[in-house]
Image (cartoon, rainbow, N blue to C red):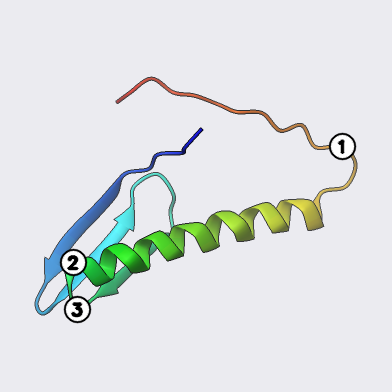
Amino acid sequence: MARQFTAAYKKAGQWYMGWVEEIPGVNTQGKTLREVKANLREALILVLETNRALLKKDSKGKVIREAISLPPA
């Protein structure tokens, strides 16, 4: 199942800023909207991969993992 997140974009001067609303720290910038979208996708992937790797490294004992769903906002 594909995971969905909300990307937000804003033009600031000559740059575009982008961030993922649901995950603090996933943000980037680019000269064009196309560039910031690509950068944001890469940033999101890196943060999710890093969080998963840190959990595996730092967890002691059994970790219970499960999917969690929320109704649409």
Q: Residues within 10 Å of mark 3 (few under 14, many from 20)?
A: some
**What quarter of the picture does the C terminus occupy?**
top left
Instruction: Tell me whether the residue at label 3 lies in contact with that at label 1, contact meaning CB atoms closer than 8 angstroms.
Output: no
Amino acid type of disc 3? Lys
Label 1 – label 2 distance at C-alpha: 43 Å
Q: Is residue 69 left or right of residue 29?
A: right
Q: Which residue is mark 2?
A: 33
Residue 53 location, x and y as percent? 71, 57
Could one spot residue 25 in this view of the protein?
no
Could one spot residue 59 in this view of the protein?
yes
Amino acid type of disc 2? Leu
Q: Is residue 21 left or right of residue 51?
A: left
- At horizontal 24% and vertical 52% (from top left) the residue drawn is 8
Element assignment for label 1: loop
Q: Which residue is mark 1?
A: 62
Residue 70 location, x and y as percent? 44, 23
Q: Residues within 10 Å of mark 2 (few under 14, many from 20)?
A: some
Q: Which residue is mark 3?
A: 31
